[in-house]
Amino acid sequence: MSEPISASDTNTIEISQETDRPWERLEELADAGDTESLTTYLESLSVGDQALALSRTDEAHLQTVLTSLAGEDAAELLRHLSESQAADIVETLPAEDAAAIVHEMPSDEQADLLGDLDAKQVSAILEALPHEEADAVRKLTAYSDDVAGGLLVREILRFDYSTKVADVISTLSENADEFRDYDVQYAYLTDAENRLVGVLPMRNLLFARRSDPVADIMIADPLSLRDDTPLDDLIDFFETHHFLGVPVVDAEGKLLGVVHRNAVDYEATRAAENDFLKSQGIIGGEELRTMPLFLRARRRLSWLSINILLNIGAAAVIAIYQDTLEKVIALAVFLPIISDMSGCSGNQAVAVSMRELSLGLIRPTEMLRVWLKEVSVGLINGAALGLLVAIVAVVWDGNPYLGLVVGLALFANTIVAVSIGGTVPLVLKRFGFDPAVASGPLLTTVTDMCGFFLVLGLATAMLNQLI
Amino acid sequence: MSEPISASDTNTIEISQETDRPWERLEELADAGDTESLTTYLESLSVGDQALALSRTDEAHLQTVLTSLAGEDAAELLRHLSESQAADIVETLPAEDAAAIVHEMPSDEQADLLGDLDAKQVSAILEALPHEEADAVRKLTAYSDDVAGGLLVREILRFDYSTKVADVISTLSENADEFRDYDVQYAYLTDAENRLVGVLPMRNLLFARRSDPVADIMIADPLSLRDDTPLDDLIDFFETHHFLGVPVVDAEGKLLGVVHRNAVDYEATRAAENDFLKSQGIIGGEELRTMPLFLRARRRLSWLSINILLNIGAAAVIAIYQDTLEKVIALAVFLPIISDMSGCSGNQAVAVSMRELSLGLIRPTEMLRVWLKEVSVGLINGAALGLLVAIVAVVWDGNPYLGLVVGLALFANTIVAVSIGGTVPLVLKRFGFDPAVASGPLLTTVTDMCGFFLVLGLATAMLNQLI
């Protein structure tokens, strides 16, 4: 992957070119049983190509690849994959092999991975792990992904606060290789009951007298967070503080581990990606096209069936006005336009509300404020869209009253759509629902009903002018 | 914000409660001119409440707040805000005051902020900065946000590689306060021409002889990236390597600065959030409801006007079949259902394709693969939805042929929708367009046209059975 450049004499990386069909090469190497070439080949691939190659390799070869790699290399490989892909792969492995890989993962990744497997497989893997480790993993897996307990790593530097500076330095020096993987800037100091009493910035060791206890150069009463601190508060914490990590304690102040900034950033990205997926109707877990067909179809269908019922409900309004529609058939052309455009306007308002909610710029109770801000935009854009559609109607049909009806309806329904779109996420949030999932269908149903009612109701009122 | 808990004797943070109307308190304190209380009050607020308070404070008070804080505190405050909010606030300040704040920001934030201001204001601020700094800022601002050059910080520890260990340690010790803000784990070693020759992990200083040159304990030929490395490759780099930062060099191998993992994670989150906003029709920049009404309306309208034109084009299909519709008015009830449901099915396929593209699990050229995977889901879900809508039609209208027409149409159009939804993001990506912006409108237009054509075409063919 890296290529020294003679001009600069440094190891500047040229990102590798796409490899053609890397999964075929992977299967070849697995068949040949040459572990070293396999490892080298995988390392030569970009992260994207690793994910691609593994997703396209058949199950038998995949097992050979993962079991022939050293546990550590396999763990490293899995951490580059999306969580659902990693879980899908581990599910194909015998529990013993899966346990060997899990054993090499840092504790936050262990918890993530096991959280995505089914209960039966989790207990099989836990049984295959060393007893003590299994206990620790079980404890962390009990936390959900979005609280401090579920995001912490147990692999931290921990010393009794009475340890001498010289002893800390010699421990560090003896275990330099192991600690290299920790990205260590701090050691955490505890008392005899494992309660956190201080944090020791490693750089303080540089200037310290070696015979002093580390307590003399530690930061006493360090900031820490409880294990049940939710993700939003963790994001807030790392925005407020420059730290790369924060120690996490349980109800008794005992040190459980450290949540790193990276883990929180990663979850924040995942939350944003999930909001996108959910708003598009991918619910109940990420979908990759390598997953079984019926799982994919079933998950998508559960979302579609709710939507079609809501849609049929909205369309019932049209059925009520069938007589009017029969007399002014041109209205049928405009019904889908009004439905689609109101959806578009409403979704814009939904997106702005969700963004403002996540930035803290609006509170779930401030319905009136949002509504006023949306109505003003709705008046302008509704007028523009209504005018446009009215002109189209008049030019096409020749009857100015048809223009009046559809123009007025779209104008009014745009205002309805932005009002609902702006406030629905606040209401959902306030009552503990997920705005990303539920805002879209609720918005579409109400604006469709209302739009059909406006067009057909106005047309009924002006029927004499329209015929 | 922090509250010691007696039970544990540690500084476990209780996340502060929401403050009622914090902007009023802020305006009071600004009027009183008490800088110290102002600083203390702002620090007591959560990041969300800071953003809220600043967004609701009027312009005059905001100027007082920002100019009465020390430049450093004001810079700290702005970094907690979203980029568009920060830019909006800085735009209200005189160039001198803005420059005093910019001066205190790390270089990547300087570049971000100035990138969001208009050109006239940027040059006013640059003129008010010290000459040398203005040059450096100008250089970084020239890079776009999504390449290494635009994300790097210049504030790094940099030594000549011939410096003695003892001299590095004493420099660190003398400047301990300044370096505390750097989150330093590495120093970067350069030759006389400022070319990167090595990286020095700070922990190596612990075990080194003080009279040796740092070159003896450095990592020689360290990995580095070019200034034009795009964001996707940076994400890939940090997924592959454990590093917290990577040095960035120009074409001649000269060290420009370091891109930190955090900056890359932040951009990744922003990209995911923007995909969500764009897919919902918030285009041309983030919208906050504190922005001017006409800006908000104009940006939203530019997106809506394209959509309404596409919509009118699709609805033209209905106009063509007006005769059929006149004879079987019940069809008008099902047109919006078929349009909406096809949009839903297609959007699911769009979301999965965009996710697989971003994970590298699919290449933009693999249209056939995606299409096959989507058709199979489309067959199942189309059959289920088609059957449901057919039953509804038969129960409501009593004519089995109406059920046949709308059921078949929805079945076929679901397959069309997932085929288009799955492949459109690949095509757009391949030709350099943004799938998040363009997939939705393209999908809706084609599936609407096709759906209307299917319902009304089938109905025309079976007209004798339907009347």
Image: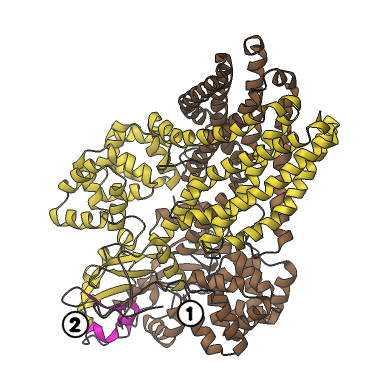
Chain colours: A brown, B yellow
Does residue B219 belong to the magenta stretch? Answer: yes
**In which chain is the residue bearing label 1?**
A
**A197 in relation to A75, above or below:** above
Any part of residue B397 in sight: yes
The residue drawn where x is 49% and y is 45% is B277
The answer to which image quadrant residue B173 occupies is: bottom left
A159 or A299, which is in the foreground?
A299
Q: Is residue A106 above or below residue A36?
A: above
* Stretch of the chain drawn in magenta: B192-221
Q: Are marks 2 and 1 on the same chain?
A: no
Q: Amino acid at mark 1?
A: Glu
Q: Position of residue B145 (x, y in %)?
A: 34, 55
Please name the residue that numbered disc 2 is placed on: B162
Measure how far apart labels 2 and 1 are at the Cα level. 34 Å
Residue at point 70%, 53% (across, down)? B378
Name the amino acid type tagged 2: Ser
Task: Report whether A361 appears left or right of A79.
Answer: left
Residue A467 placement: quadrant:
top right
Quadrant containing the N terminus of chain A is: bottom left
Residue A77 image point, x, y percent: 54, 75
Between B256 and A448, the residue placed more toward the observer is A448
* Chain identity of mark 2: B
Q: Residues within 10 Å of mark 1 (few under 14, many from 20)?
A: some
Q: Is residue A139 visible?
A: no
Asked whether residue B464 is drawn in magenta, I would say no
